Amino acid sequence: MPTLRFTKDHEWIRQDGDTAVIGITDYAQQQMGDIVYVELPAVGSTVEAGKEAAVVESAKAASEVYAPVSGEVVAVNEAIAGDPAKVNADPMGEGWFLTVKLADPKALDGLMDEAAYQKFVAEQG
Amino acid sequence: MRYLPLTPDDRRQMLAAIGVRSIDDLFADVPEPARRTALLDLPLAQGELQVERALSRMAAKNVAAGSAPFFIGGGAYRHHVPAAVDHLIQRGEFLTSYTPYQPEISQGTLQALFEFQTQVALLTGMDVANASMYDGATSCAEAVAMAHRITRRGKAILSGALHPHYREVCETYAQFSGLRVQALKPTPGTADPIDLDDETACVVVQYPDFFGELRDCSALAERCHQAGALLIVAVTEIVSLGAVKPPGEMGADIVAAEGQALGNALNFGGPYVGLFATREQYVRQMPGRLAGQTVDADGRRGWVLTLSTREQHIRREKATSNICTNSGLCALAFTIHTALLGEAGLTRLSQLNHAAACNLADRLEAVPGVSVVNHSFFNEFTVRLPKPAAPVVAALAEYGVLGGVPLSRFYPDRNDLADLLLVAATETATEDDIGAFAHALGEVLR
Amino acid sequence: MTGWSQALSGANGQMTAAPSEAAPDTPTFIGNRGLQLEEKLLFEQDSPGHCGVDLPAPPPHRSRLGGLERQTPIGLPGLSEPQVVRHFTRLSQKNYAIDSGLYPLGSCTMKHNPRLNEKVARLPGFADLHPLQPVSTIQGALELIETLAHWLRTLTGMPAVALSPAAGAHGELCGMMTIRAALTAQGDPRRRILVPESAHGTNPATAAACGYEIDPIPNDPRGRVDLTALKAKLGPAVAALMLTNPNTCGLFENEILEIAASVHEAGAFFYADGANFNAIVGRVRPADLGIDALHLNLHKTFSTPHGGGGPGSGPVALAASLAPHAPLPWIVHGEGGRRLIEHTEGSATQTIGRLKGFHGQMGMFVRALSYMMSHGADGLRQVAEDAVLNANYLRVRLAGALSQSFPGACMHEVLFDDRFLKDTGVATLDFAKALIDEGFHPMTMYFPLVVHGALLIEPTETESKASLDQFADTVNALAARAKTDPASFHAAPRLTPRRRLDETGAARKPLLRWRPEPVRQEAAE
């Protein structure tokens, strides 16, 4: 059963074995508004926990998507590069950004679970 | 004071409404040591008549280009601008409006910018152009920075035949951004030897080059692309593209040009208008503003500033450039002049320029000791004199002829270039002007 | 993710589509509406072969184009002069401008553009002058530039001024480059620039272009730079502080002397962004505030026209420690008059080099000097006072209905935020669009970033009291209507040549030029 976790910067990460899929949450896509462009990392590059992994743009803003964990990028979602609206429509599913091979399989332990994240979002006001 | 609408009565009422005794109360945050009660040591207010008189006196100490036979180019060109251009750009809605951040009330500016971008793309033979930069030299420096971003390589090679100001600006920018610039030695009359390696982000050439020569850069473009580098072509005389093959058809990746020659007076060097054009695939790496087509809530066509997320007001330190202002009104003047000329007019204008330069070349070569260095040229070329050119130019000025620029002005350390003179002839040079130049040159060289 | 949340709430870039409930106008045959005239693109009005300029046929000549004659058409449309004049006249009529009405854009200083300036700039002795003419033929130009420099030195109190930067951001680059050059000459360029969170985007962008990293400083609850935080961040790695004063919240940094002292004590330079100089011109000299480098915007404080986005001019006033690094060219006196130093030689061996082609924005110098001479020392001081008076008058007239971000007096601009719109469903963006229907250009929105849904209002000194009252009455009425009829805001603007435009679509599928329709192939294949 894949483990789903969340960050304070509104990224989600879903682990399945030694890889994990990363995206932005529904709250994040709502705050961004209509997404017009995404910049994805190269397959084979490495990402570092807490550092920029991707960029997402609306007409009026650009925002970094930070990697919740460190690892090697094994796949990126070309579909959202061609049709950024998918991120708005289905942020937790078809709007995924990248898949990483985890440097540390236990890295998700320190992140919020769904209940904690929903509480965190409610506090944002 | 004629520009200040508030009356003393207004001020009294407003201070009362605000609830302070005097205007000084509103400057209370200024620290005591920095407060000034005395006026600064500058003249007091003057009426229009006095100001006009004072500035006219200064203007009269200059020799206007149109008052003498005139043959100076070197990156800025004297063309005839139709009367309608200056009238239209002085309409208050163009002159006194701001950047079109509220598109619903700026469709005039936005449509004009879209037309400008299209004209620049057509002239240069490229896919897309931006809404202008400060000038050709800074446009060139930004092109080099863009090549660095795209290729992630650290070295730019600048042709020795690139306008020295363009080279210098690239060098200044690179000094602070960490990019390495390799500026090749200027060799008027001979092509540069360009060695590419895997550190090369771009090669910058000029077309026509600084000495006036026209060279096909298709082969160079091919070499650059095979080496993984970009070819940047700088153009200082945009009217030339009415007569010659455009850089886009020769494989250029970025064109960084000066648009002054269309619509804009010489103005002692500024304000001018930088043109910037590139290929579709590099659009998101472009600096500067972009006007894009869209529709409104009723489905009607309109225009907006777009891809703004490249720019400083959104990306801040990650922007493609720090540029904020474009050269709006100068770009508009360019657009209007180009609209008046159209295909037939620009073609004919460029032919007139070339014909004038051919005529000048023939007349100058007939002066004993004078030879033309160039194999080819558009409206500007280099001549070799039998003695240093700088004193010759000064002597020509005494004769009332503005006869070109000595290369020593740009290369003071190159004794081997001291005899070379850069001359230009546009459609504004008459037969009499050309005759006067040739005659005066003959006299001065005797 | 960061960086987006407060800038965007309610400003999704989405169009509001409420066409059917909008004004039920009688459609016209070709879409014109009274004086609002539709106008196609130039490229859609091509009369091939037509020309709006009569040129003689070129005399016969032997081509010396080296075989590079153009083989393909350029693709430009042909029009006559009447068509071109009508085209651009119609375009102009779709623009709002200072000449039309109040333009309260904070930090832009949209003051009246005097027409005398246009007249003198067009004197042939200035306009028809080539930058490379022999120096004996341009002495009047050099005299004008030096006169302008004298006014700027006197107004700022600084000993030197670099005139070549073409715009404010270019001036920032110039200033930061001289700072880096000065520190490098001391053997220690340092790594970091401190920039307030409220700074204009050009500040961090410029610092990055100079190879520096940026460390942001928070505001304190009074809307000024947090002095404690600043002091904590100063250290041997900091090259400079970039500060705007008055700041982008419209407030004078009253602790500025202590700020300057702390910065200098740490061995760093104090750079000031002079965008808001209009608040203090003639009353306060930046040199007296401890500033080392300050860029000015001739197109803001000194009235050179905004021209739909440019051109500008951004001279930089420099302290003695930075003056040797000023960019080329320099003007010096010699026997026989003034001349230009165009190379790294003589007194200019430590220059950072050239930042622009030729000498600078001469056309803007003439206009700015004309403005300064018209106002004089007394007039310029009055400019600052009236600018501050007008802004404070609007502050008190609007304070009841709007939510002022930082209480108390402001300088030349006043900052509000969107708390007054809370629970109305109307965002700052919608409020601005409704203001457009009322015949005003909106104030600056969503800047500075330090408050939510910012509205920054700068009237300038060239607005009459009546104009301010009209504006205040309108804004107050809109604020009241936001509570009762939010839908009307979402539909705005309704009365403009175009309604809200689809910026999302424009960014997703950029269309940045006109292209001809593909020609239909004849069925001959």
Image (tube, coloured by chain):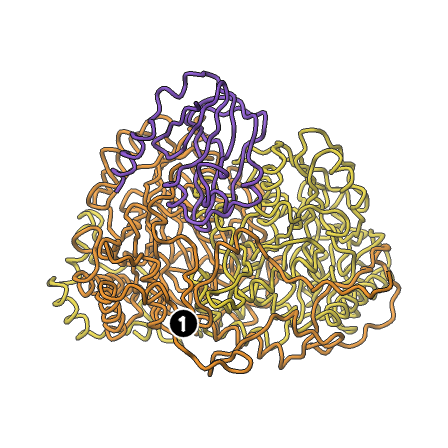
Query: Where is residue B380, by image quadrant?
Result: bottom right
**Residue C29 % position (x, y):** 54, 82
Q: Nearer the viewer, residue C47 or C261?
A: C47
- Residue B357: in sight, yes or no? yes
Q: Chain in orange?
A: C
Chain B color in figure:
yellow
Residue bearing mark 1: C114
How many residues crowd mark 1 within 10 Å: few (<14), some (14–19), many (20+)? some
Quadrant in which the N terminus of chain A appears: top left
- Give the chain of mark 1: C
Query: Where is residue B149, by image quadrant?
Result: top right
Q: Chain in purple?
A: A
Q: Is residue C16 left or right of residue C104?
A: right
Say if C318 sits above or below C91 in the image: above
Q: Residue at x 51, y 49 (%)?
A: C330
Q: Amino acid at mark 1?
A: Pro
Q: Residue at x 65, y 49 (%)?
A: B280
Q: Is residue C518 left or right of residue C459?
A: right
**Residue C238 % position (x, y):** 37, 30
